């Protein structure tokens, strides 16, 4: 090492060290380290990501709110005629045009089918219950949604393959009066021993997933619309929960998932929070998981959220206070060439203050935007 390199290394280390000694969070130390490296000629990946959001409703007022706080790309839903299980091309186009009026890009569409709901509350559960003729009608509707999005110029649809919805065991107080959902597998008590789906083994769950992909991936390929699946939130113990084995609640399960009907149009709505919840040591492991799926171009969207804890025991968190180094994570997405949205998800709420969710979203937009700007100018 020559003298110039030696001094550059000292400078980078000093910048990071001063951030830590000043009592700043871990991501600030990472930012200082990478800023120093960038100024001394270190190679920096180009930042291609966009600030996004998926919050509802699809109205002029809400779209103006998103644009006000720097959001540029969105996932949104449209109106549907009663009795129809998909939005037409004209209905999707109407949402796209409303978004464009506020200088927002409609990058992902929410279908009516396959939400993140519990099967006992789901009105259209044929695909996940493997019940005929309901699932044949529903998969045809999903195929029609792909065609409608293609005709309306929207390149992606996101969906869930869930029977249990989002599981939490309660709420915890965070800073101030914020409340965060938490999960403790050891104390979790299901409301009933089984859901209306009955026992669902791993093999049965994979059969339902494979059946769905066999029917929709060819249509996605034909119309060049990406379909992005959300991981199961959270993973459950090996023996299952309410009789159900959550096969998309582990990284290994997600790796298997992307190999079924392999396609450039079949990938993940990569919820960073959910994936972190399914790792024993997310603060160490999340980066290589991003590299695995990102290098294979299987990350179509990112729910950019933080947690405290890991598999089996965690709570949600503001993006700046969890265990994950969010600046380092952002640089990892840049490293793999990810060019989609980073969007907040599961923001905290305050009981009795319905406007607090919008405040939490605004805080998250500012935090993500700040991280992106820091990475761009380092």
Image (cartoon, rainbow, N blue to C red):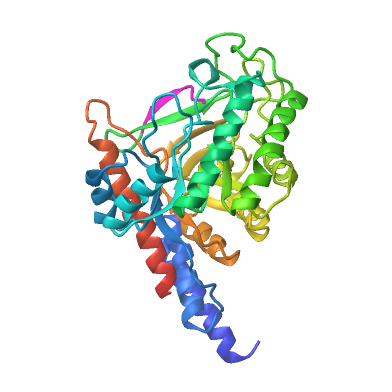
| In the foreground, 356 or 20 | 356
| Res. 195 in view | yes
Q: Which residues are magenta?
A: 167-173
Side of 268 where 77 appears, left or right: left
Can you say which quadrant of the picture contains the C terminus?
bottom left
| In the foreground, 264 or 269 | 264
User: Residue 82, percent across and down?
Assistant: 39, 25
User: Residue 132, percent across and down?
Assistant: 66, 19
Side of 360 where 85 appears, left or right: right
Q: Is residue 267 above or below residue 2?
A: above
Q: Is residue 373 magenta?
A: no
Farthest residue to the right: give it.
203
Q: Is residue 172 magenta?
A: yes
Can you say which quadrant of the picture contains the N terminus?
bottom right
Number of numbered markers: 0
Farthest residue to the bottom: give it.
3
Q: Is residue 201 above or below residue 303?
A: above
**Residue shown at 55% from the left, 52% from the top:** 300
User: Residue 366, percent across and down?
Assistant: 31, 55
**Residue shown at 70% from the left, 19% from the top:** 200
| Res. 20 in view | no
| In the foreground, 100 or 175 | 100
Q: Is residue 342 above or below residue 117?
A: below
Side of 85 where 93 appears, left or right: left
**Residue shown at 47% from the left, 62% from the top:** 49
User: Residue 35, percent across and down?
Assistant: 45, 73
């Amino acid at each position: 090492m020559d003298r110039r390199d030696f001094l550059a290394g000292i400078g980078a280390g000093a910048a990071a060290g001063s951030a830590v000694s000043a009592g700043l969070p871990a991501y600030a130390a990472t930012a200082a380290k990478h800023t120093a490296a960038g100024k001394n000629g270190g190679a920096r990946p180009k930042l291609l990501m966009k600030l996004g959001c998926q919050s509802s409703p699809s109205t002029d007022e809400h779209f103006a709110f998103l644009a006000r706080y720097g959001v540029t790309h969105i996932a949104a839903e449209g109106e549907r005629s009663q009795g129809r299980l998909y939005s037409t091309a004209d209905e999707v186009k109407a949402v796209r045009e409303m978004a464009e009026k506020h200088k927002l890009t409609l990058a992902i569409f929410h279908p009516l089918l396959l939400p993140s709901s519990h099967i006992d509350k789901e009105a259209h559960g044929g695909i996940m219950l493997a019940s005929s003729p309901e699932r044949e009608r529903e998969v045809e509707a999903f195929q029609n949604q792909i065609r409608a999005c293609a005709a309306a110029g929207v390149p992606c649809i996101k969906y869930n393959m869930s029977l249990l919805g989002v599981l939490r065991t309660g709420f915890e107080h965070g800073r101030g009066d914020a409340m965060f959902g938490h999960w403790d597998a050891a104390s979790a008590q299901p409301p009933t021993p089984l859901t209306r789906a009955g026992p669902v083994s791993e093999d049965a769950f994979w059969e339902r997933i494979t059946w769905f992909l066999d029917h929709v991936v060819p249509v996605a390929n034909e119309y060049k619309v990406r379909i992005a699946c959300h991981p199961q939130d959270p993973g459950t113990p090996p023996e299952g929960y309410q009789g159900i084995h959550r096969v998309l609640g582990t990284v290994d399960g997600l790796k298997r998932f992307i190999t079924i009907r392999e396609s450039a149009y079949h990938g993940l709505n990569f919820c960073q929070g959910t994936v972190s919840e399914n790792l024993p040591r997310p603060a160490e492991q999340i980066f290589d998981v991003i590299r695995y799926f990102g290098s294979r171009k299987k990350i179509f969207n990112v729910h950019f959220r933080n947690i405290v804890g890991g598999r089996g025991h965690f709570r949600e968190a503001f993006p700046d206070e969890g265990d994950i180094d969010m600046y380092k994570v952002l640089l990892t997405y840049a490293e793999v060439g990810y060019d989609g949205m980073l969007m907040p998800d599961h923001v905290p709420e305050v009981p009795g203050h319905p406007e607090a969710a919008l405040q939490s979203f605004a805080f998250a937009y500012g935090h993500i935007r700040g991280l992106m700007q820091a990475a761009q100018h380092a």
